[in-house]
Image (cartoon, rainbow, N blue to C red):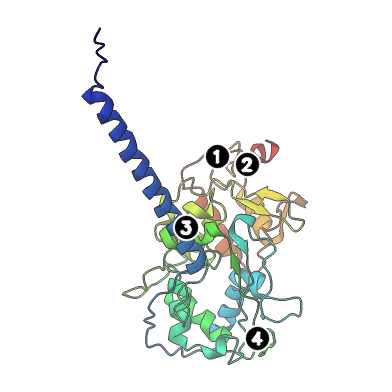
Amino acid sequence: MEVHFPKPSTNHFNMKKLLKILGILLGVAILAIAAGAAYIHFDGIPKYKTNPPQLTVTADSAMVAEGKRLATMVCSKCHMAASGLMEGHEMKDLPHQFGRAWTANITRDEKYGTGRYTDGELAFLLRTGIKRDGQYAPPWMPKLPHLSDYDLQSIIAYLRSDAPELAPVSKAQPPSQPSFLTKFLSHVAFKPLPYPTGPVTAPPVTDKVAFGKYMCTGKVECFSCHSPSFETTNVMEPEKTPGYFSGGNAMPDKEGNIIFTRNLTPDKETGIGGWTEEQFIKAVKYGQRDGKPALRYPMEPFPALTDEEASAIYAYLQTIPAIKHDVDAIGAK
């Protein structure tokens, strides 16, 4: 008796072939991802071409004084060491997901400090985030694309001054140890900013809301800490930052405990919609509200702010969209 076995169908062979092809493609994809990850890990934070402007800052005493005042608000906290000199130190309050970092020596030292930079190179670094050797300054280094030319040059004038805290220190801080996340973001998201092609000016102080916006997005740059995440900050168009000024950015305090930055939108329940201008000014400048502590580290008082500046910040914050975001509830989870 002759037995006939059914022949395998064409569909069966096609399915096996398809699965084999899919397996190969998956393997190639995994290898590509692994190769990309290895490249990012070993390449670290990228380097770029430099193109600093031809700039020589001509300063007077008023410009130096303004530069020093501005530096106390945006530079000193990160660069001032326990020695009382701007020689840099480890950033203990850097969110752990970014790795470990040491701020640079910005004393006048000509080998390790800002003394080795030209005025144009300093302006290029502060605007774009590119150092004189082409190295991109890590994400935790603020970039100041919206700072007025006068204010930017005032900082440079101060760095050139004979201020005692800038006395030359022949010391280089340890190289930072960025996490893989930092390296990855520096390849795909955090990029050098364009250098302005024209003059950058500040609005007049008489235009209170516009001047307040300048303070928040240019001069002091409050929005980056007070929006939900550094990873989604839109530096060039701050008001397009997701959750603009609604707080919730996770940051460590002095003991390493995670706190969440405050909601500064005019929401009456979770923001500052119920605050008076006087309460806001006292909180920002002196850390007090109605006689009680109003700030939490890493947010510290800004006594160098003028009442006019603090009032303008308050006026601007009252105009942005209110967002209901209870940051205390985040910490309670």
Residue 88 position, x and y percent, is 66, 76
Element at label 3:
helix
Q: Amino acid at mark 3?
A: Ala
User: In the rendered image of this protein, does residue 154 appear above or below residue 141?
Assistant: below
| Residue to which mark 2 is pinned | 327
How many C-alpha atoms fall within 10 Å of the one at disc 3: few (<14), some, or many (≥20)? Answer: some
Query: What is the x, y in percent for residue 9?
Result: 23, 22
Compare marks 1 and 4 and give the one earlier in the sequence: 4
Query: Would residue 232 be seen by someone viewing this image from the given angle?
Result: yes
* Disc with the residue nearer the chain's start (1 vs 2): 1
The residue positioned farthest toward the top in the image shown: 1
Residue drawn at (53%, 60%) of the image: 182
Disc 3 or 1, which lies upstream in sequence? Answer: 3
Q: Hey, which residue is sitting farthest front in the picture? A: 1
* Amino acid carrying mark 4 in the image: Leu
Q: Earlier in the sequence, mark 2 or mark 3?
A: 3
Percent position (x, y) of residue 272? 59, 45
Distance in Å between CA atoms under marks 1 and 4: 42 Å
Q: Give the quarter of the image for residue 146.
A: bottom left
Regarding mark 2 in the picture, which secondary structure is present there?
helix
At a point 61% along the width and 90% down the height, the residue shown is 109
Mark drawn on residue 166: 4
Q: Which residue does the numbered mark 1 point to in the structure image?
A: 267
Q: Which amino acid is tagged 1?
A: Asp
- Distance from label 4 to label 2 (Cα)? 38 Å
> Which of the pair 280/151 is nearer the observer?
151
Question: According to the image, label 3 marks what residue?
Answer: 37
Q: Amino acid at mark 2?
A: Val
In the image, residue 185 above or below residue 322: below
